Image (cartoon, rainbow, N blue to C red):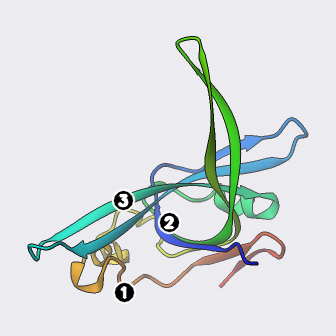
Amino acid sequence: MFNKIILIGRLGQNAEAKTTQNNKEYVILNIATQESWKNDKGDYENRTEWHRVYAWRNLSKFAKTLQKGQLITLEGTLRYREVEDEVKGTTFKHRIAEIHAISMKRLSKIEAADDPSDGARDEQSPAFGGWGENIASSTICCQDRAGCEIE
């Protein structure tokens, strides 16, 4: 059996650092991915999906450096968590999908998160189907088990 998620997307906000009750540090990232396709009329349509990603241990140190708008790639596992919400006195149980990152790589420059030359223009290109070929060279790669390294 196999549980592996691979995403290439942009951060919707700066990384959010948190600490568990056991003083373990982790980071929550909100990653947007985009899908493009041609509809029956021949027009291109887009859909953006938002993914909640958790980075733990060594990977959280790297994830804290990520900023809104940056293009990243990550590998992780899909996990589900049951939560209870109360609305107007009624309790509802539901499941939330989360991605727990194993490795991450920054694909755009830190200072150029909003610069179209870092690959953002290509993300919108319907001719390529949503992801650009001219993604900027990575600056940092980090894997949870191996720590962070500069490439």
Q: Secondary structure at mark 3?
A: strand
> In the picture shown, does residue 71 fall above or below 57?
below
Kind of residue indicated by mark 1: Asn
* CA–CA distance in space, label 1 to label 3: 21 Å
Foreground: disc 2 or disc 1: 1
Amino acid beneath label 2: Ile
Q: Is residue 40 left or right of residue 92?
A: left
Residue for point 61% across, 52% down = 97
Instruction: Tell which of 85 and 74 is nearer to you.
Output: 85
Disc 1 vs disc 3: Cβ atoms closer than 8 Å?
Answer: no
Q: Residue at x 47, y 73 (%)?
A: 108
Q: Quadrant of residue 123?
A: bottom left
Residue that badge 3 annotates: 48
Marks 3 and 2 sit apart, C-alpha to C-alpha, by 23 Å
Q: Quadrant of residue 46?
A: bottom left
- The secondary structure type at the circle numbered 2 is loop
Q: Which residue is mark 2?
A: 110
Q: Are there few (<14), some (14-19), or many (20+) residues within 10 Å of tag 1?
A: few
Locate the C terminus and report the quarter of the image it occupies: bottom right
Q: CA distance from mark 2 to mark 1?
A: 17 Å
For the residue pair 110 and 51, the one nearer the viewer reads as 51
Q: Which residue is mark 1?
A: 134
Q: Position of residue 149 (x, y in %)?
A: 73, 78
Which is nearer the N-term, disc 3 or disc 2? 3
The quadrant holding residue 33 is: bottom left
Q: Nearer the viewer, residue 10 or 6?
A: 6
Q: Earlier in the sequence, mark 1 or mark 3?
A: 3
- Identify the residue at horizontal 63%, vertical 44% (top origin): 95
Q: Residue at x 36, y 79 (%)?
A: 131
Point out which mark residue 105 bears.
none
Give neighbour class at mark 2: few <14, some 14-19, many 20+ (Cα, 10 Å): some
- Depth check, mark 1 against mark 3: the one in front is 3
